[in-house]
Image (tube, rainbow, N blue to C red):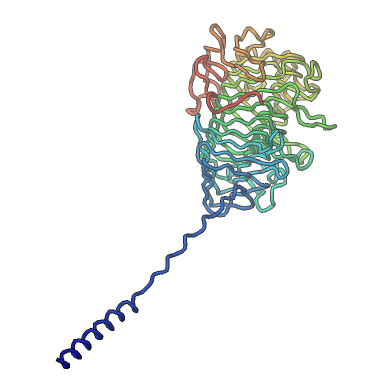
Amino acid sequence: MKKQFFYLLALVIVMFASSCSKSDTTTTTTPTPTPTPAVFDPNIRGIITANRTLKKDSVYILRGYVYVATGVTLTIEPGTKITSKKDSAGVLVVYRGAKIIAEGTATAPIVFTSGEATPAAGDLGGIVIVGQAPGNNNHSVVEGGVDAAFSAFGGTDKTDNSGILKYVRIEYGGKAVNPGDEINGLSLYGVGSGTTIDYVQVLRGYDDAFEFFGGTVNCKHLIAYNSADDDYDMDDGYSGKIQFALSIKDPKFTDPKGTTGDVSNNFEVDNVNPANGFVLSRPPITFPVMSNFTAVGPNTAPGANGTSADYGWGMRWRRGTKFILANSAVIGSAKGGFRLQEDSTIAYFARGTSGFYNSYINVAAGLAVDVQTGLSIPGITYDAASILALIKGSNKSEVVTDVTALKLGDPFNNAAPNLKPLAGSPLLTGALFDFGGLTDSFFEKVAYKGAFDGTTDWTTGWAVWGR
């Protein structure tokens, strides 16, 4: 019995030891700590050196000069808001070889705007797109204090593609670095025809709304609203096409002109500035071809009824430019309607290369047609009367003394402008696309003149007024 007892006791001890051994050797797994989520930083600064997407569910702050480097694509989702503070007015520079893909929708536009509680012009710098299309080097570098490493522009690629701006608003822009050295709402330097610019509004900014420095980019559905200087400023050999556009001026708002003698216009188009030491015929010559604009001036003389004394012309063509503006209405001009300056500019128009075609002029003050005199142009005898005769004759355009004859909805209501033609308006029919570059397939061969057909308002949903 004793032997059996000790045998059983030994067996129990062995089994217990075996059980303890298994328990003691069990591996305990330490849980992996959950990483702390990165804190979202809304500020955008410096140089963007890798592809980046800005999301619609975030609000961003553009701080100072921000550069999209060569080879990089900045994508912005529909509905995204990018703000700027006045202490570091943001300037977005999309450099040569880079792209911006900012493709909003009519119901979800992309908005660059002020981040201040009380927005004002200059809170945002603006957007600068720098391409590789040709120009004539009237400007040697990008204006507005841009870093020297990102200041060269232009090239030889007419079809260069800098991306897409579609259903985009640029609000409260304008950054003056020095007199005559500013950032505009949208500055296009040597931008090529591969770039898409469609449905873009620039509003309540200092300096120009849209400025084209050379390049070949084509645009549709542009709105310049309450900008302080020129609405459509073109120079440096720009040769693109534009259709369907608005230009609306706030009678009381211009940028500080000082003693420069400058004025604010709906259109200011040059080839080169002779002060830069260039002859006016320097190639390539600025030659925009435009159709279906409705341009609205202050509708009073400069300095009268609270209108800024610095308002100028509806159209100022000068310094050797060629141009075609067709199927359009330019009304309420302050200092005058149609201004031709310098001998070559006048000669291009008198010889039929340029044209103000199948369109309307109305002025609140000054001359409907104003031509620089005292010039000697070989083979051309001209004065304001003879140029006016050309406008009414071969150019098939009219001077309208009573703007109500055009039957526009409410063109001079700046807070809520209605530029659609009413029933019976002469703008509803008679558009022509049989002159010069207007035959190009870029132009939609619509029946109406001006920006609207009287039924469809292409500004609905994405554009804003009363600012």
Name the residue at the right extreme: 259
Residue 162 picture quarter:
top right
Which quadrant holds the N terminus?
bottom left
Query: Residue at (76%, 41%) from the top-left corner?
Result: 276
Please, is residue 69 above or below residue 83 in the view?
Answer: below
Q: Quadrant of the C terminus?
A: top right
Residue 281: % across, % down: 69, 35
Q: Residue at x 61, y 10 (%)?
A: 406
In the orientation shown, which residue stands out farthest toward the bottom?
3
Judging depth in this view, the residue of 194 and 300 nearest the camera is 300
> Between 337 and 226, which is closer to the camera in this rendering?
226
Toward which corner of the image does residue 282 lie, by quadrant?
top right
Foreground: 132 or 29? 29
Any part of residue 237 in sight: no
Q: Is residue 180 left or right of residue 48?
A: right
Q: How many marks?
A: 0
x and y percent of residue 304 in the render? 80, 16
Task: Answer yes or no: is residue 113 visible.
Answer: yes
Residue 190 percent across, percent down from the top left: 61, 41
Name the residue: 64% across, 52% down.
46
Q: Which is nearer the eye, 130 or 349? A: 130
